[in-house]
Image (tube, rainbow, N blue to C red):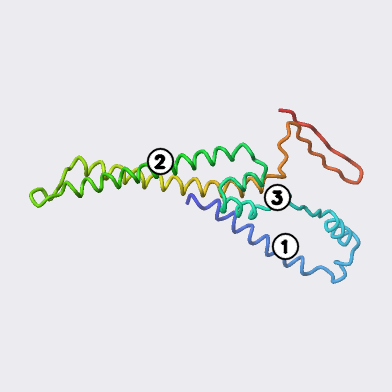
Amino acid sequence: MKYFPGASLFLCLILYQNSFAQSFNALPENFSNLSLISDSVKNKQSVKKSFTMKKDPWKAVGFSAILPGAGQYYNESYWKIPVILGLGGYFVYELVKNNNSYLDYKEQYSNSQTPENPEGDLYTKSLRDFYRDQRDDFIIYSVILYVVNLIDAYVDAQLYDFDVSDKLKISLSGKKQSVGFNVNF
């Protein structure tokens, strides 16, 4: 019962649409030749303006895919380049450091395993596992940074032409009237 008002409204809209379509089809054939309709169609076609973007989003993504930060350079977002390169450099540094520690402790753990002690040194094993997990985490962080770099280049190129000035101006102009206002933040 709680869906009854929505269902009845939906049914009324469908019935109204069908009755409107039937009455529209009953109009005379020369109705489309009226100047009112043809003028409005001409005005709608003449109002269309072509907009071309200054920056190509996929070109920015391509640049960032080849060299992280290059898409931001293409989009003239220069402050983002050191952030991306700094985080990327830190993640790669930690990845290499943790991988080297993992390899060292892996070798130490292998050497600690003897026929008398097949388990080996459990502390060395836990350190080996810790550095392996840290290395894997930094691989994930690097991949996330790379993907965010690509997404940022795409979005920044899409919004390159977006006006973010302090003064917003909206003006609507018709044949006889003009409306305009300014908003200051």
State the separation of the CA atoms marked 2 and 1: 69 Å
Residue on which disc 2 sits: 94
Which residue is pictured at 34% across the width and 45% down the height? 100
User: Does 181 sit left or right of 12 as displayed?
Assistant: right
Residue on which disc 3 sits: 55
**Please, what is the three-letter code of the amino acid marked with disc 1?**
Phe
Which residue is pictured at 71% across the width and 42% down the height? 162
Q: Position of residue 119 (x, y in %)?
A: 14, 48
Mark 2 crowdedness (10 Å alpha carbons): few <14, some 14-19, many ≥20 = some
Mark 1 crowdedness (10 Å alpha carbons): few <14, some 14-19, many ≥20 = few
Q: Nearer the viewer, mark 2 or mark 1?
A: 2
Q: Residue furthest left?
A: 116
State the separation of the CA atoms marked 3 and 2: 35 Å
User: Does 150 sit left or right of 40 as displayed?
Assistant: left
Tag 2, which secondary structure?
A: helix
The mark nearer the N terminus, 3 or 1, is: 1
Task: Relative to 29, say whether 98 is above or below.
Answer: above
Tag 1, which secondary structure?
A: helix
User: Does 40 sit left or right of 22 as displayed?
Assistant: right
Which residue is pictured at 88% across the width and 62% down the height? 38
**128 or 142, nearer to the observer:** 128
Residue on which disc 1 sits: 20
User: Does 173 sit left or right of 72 as displayed?
Assistant: right
**170 or 120, nearer to the observer:** 120
Quadrant of the rendering where the C terminus is positioned: top right
